[in-house]
Image: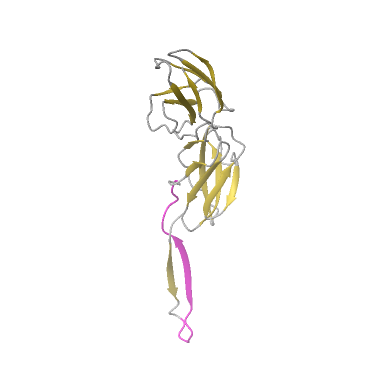
Amino acid sequence: KYGNFGTLEWIDQSISSAPKYRAVMYVLNSSATVPGNFTGIAASSNTITWTCTAPVDVFEYLIYSSTATGLNDYITRISSTNLSWVQTGLNPNTTSNMQIRMYSIFADTSPISAVATVSTRANPPVNTSVVSVTSVVISIQWSANNNPIGTIFNVQCSTVNDFSLINQTATTTVATYNLINLSAATTYYVRIRAFNTDGNSTSWDSIVSTCT
């Protein structure tokens, strides 16, 4: 199962006249193994691409969620030597837990793989705006853009519009933030981005600026 092939040959020497007769029997010389290179990559905020490279005698994959209860409780079957399957219809910054079995040309299924866990990308925050300003505090807000509760947002504040100097940086899981201890009569630039559960960041939302 799931390995290379060997041959056993037998020639009937009891037949004196030519030609000799040869029987060839193919035998499997390795056992079925658990798929060990099953991985996923978040392609977008609603898709994950799952891949696996298998031995030569594999021709089909059975794909399961981590909550599958039996051999036939699979999500889909993919006929291919090398798996590349795009899981669609997911939500932003959402974790997917998947497993696979490999199906061989000998109608054998491998043991199920370990659970592979990947999170979709978060959506970039949008509509960043200044809510209020004092001489030392700037209050800002933004739209979470359909990211789930608990999504991490990164706030950066700078006195230069290219952010080559960062005056403040912070993380929050709500879509508002107060920048405090600022200097009076100073222009500040602010930008926001989001992170998914796997730590991958989005692009920045549009920069906003105001003067204390």
Direction right: furthest residue: 89
Residue 148 picture quarter: top right
Question: In which quarter of the view is residue 183 placed?
Answer: top left
The residue sitting at the front extreme is 185
- Tell me: 21 left or right of 183: right
**Between residues 170 and 1, which one lies in front from this camera angle?**
170
Q: Nearer the viewer, residue 137 or 204?
A: 137
Residue at image coords 51%, 29%: 207
The answer to whether one can see residue 112 in this image is: no
Q: Residue furthest bottom?
A: 17
Relative height, residue 194 to residue 52 (above, below): above
Who's the residue at 47% across and 42% down the image?
Answer: 113
Q: Over which residues does the magenta segment extend?
A: 15-34
Q: Nearer the viewer, residue 101 or 90?
A: 90
Residue 108 lies, with reference to residue 4, above or below; the image says above
Task: Please name the predominant secondary structure of the magenta segment in the image.
Answer: loop
Q: Position of residue 188 (x, y in %)?
A: 45, 23
Percent coordinates x, y for residue 31 in the rendering: 43, 52
**Residue 162, how many percent across, how many down?**
43, 33
| Magenta-colored stretch includes residue 28 | yes
Q: Please state which of residues 148 and 15 is positioned toward the viewer in this rendering.
A: 148
What colour scheme has been applied to the protein in the rendered image? Answer: secondary structure
* Image coordinates for residue 196, horizontal then vertical, percent: 48, 31
